[in-house]
Amino acid sequence: MGIRRSTRHLLAAVAAAALILSGSVVSTTAAQATAPPPSQVTRMAALGDSITLGVSSCSSWSGCAQNSWATGSSTTVGSHLLRLRAAGATDLVAFNDAVSGSRSAALTTQAQQAVRQGAQYVTIEIGANDACTRTVAEMTPTTTFKANVAAALAALGASAAAPQIFVASIPSLQRLYEVNRASSSARFTWSLLRICQSMLANPSSTQPADVQRRAAVQQRVDEYNIALRDACSAVASCRFDGGAVAGYAFARADISTRDYFHPSVAGQARLSSITWPTTQWVSP
């Protein structure tokens, strides 16, 4: 990848983050609730999909929850769980309620599980599977996605535990494609495993139809991120990452070589390090 192309990709990532922060729709922002001190937080839950399960971050294609950016026990990753414990939540117990392959429609069920667990801190990373479908036409409509997220936030808001909620933005699928599109191993794996075909089908093609297809997928992801921001901003106890994940330009080392799609251990560590500063316990 040449310097000029790398610069364009970096600028595109910055532009995506700016879009999330500015948006095209003015939303009502609820007054943010004050988070309790970490010493009072004893239960947390992580909701979402395979990213939060740490899939492909170890020697297995299945979940590697110890490497989760949210609830992992690996000191290499330095998850939100470990950061909260270091900040004083010494009795903190974590539940990873994420389910591989989940779309936003499944988020309320996960939220209800977190409520039953009495979670006082809940992380959410959802949306990649709503865009990663067989075709562009099968992607979840943005209005449906936002309604699904709002329903999950409402379920959490009804909890007697009054959880603090953290919502992470969705990584740039275009960036994940760009990083490894020149790799024959990645192209073979994407085809063999049928990974995110809406974005990754015909990865070597520069035909207008394929270029436009990838752009349409990334546009939908950008729309989802705005929906996440707006849904979160309407809830006093919710904090959005400000586009930290969406705007991050993932490097090859951040992506697992088992499927060339999910975050590696280094990628999981990066997710934790870029999101933690935007949480209720760090960001004013």
Image (tube, grey):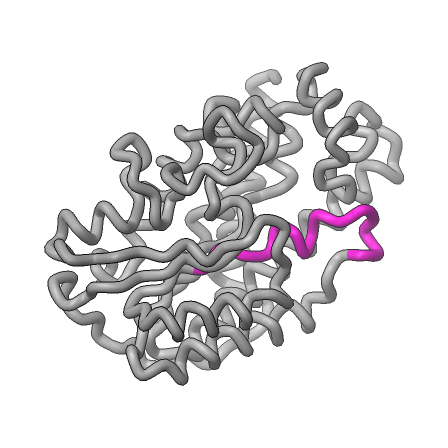
Label tally: 0
Q: Pick the residue in front: 70 or 225.
A: 70
**Residue shown at 58%/24% (left/top)?**
258
Residue 68 in percent (x, y) is at 40, 43
**Residue shown at 32%/35% (left/top)?**
77
**Residue shown at 30%/79% (left/top)?**
162
What span is in magenta?
124-138
Judged left or right of residue 12, residue 207 is right
Relative to 67, say whether 84 is above or below.
below
Q: Pick the residue in front: 144 or 12.
A: 144
Question: Residue 202 appears in which quarter of the rendering?
Answer: top right
Residue 76 in percent (x, y) is at 29, 30
Relative to 179, say whether 139 is above or below.
below
Relative to 196, say whether 188 is above or below.
above
Quarter of the image with the N terminus in it? top right
Relative to 32, say whether 69 is above or below.
above
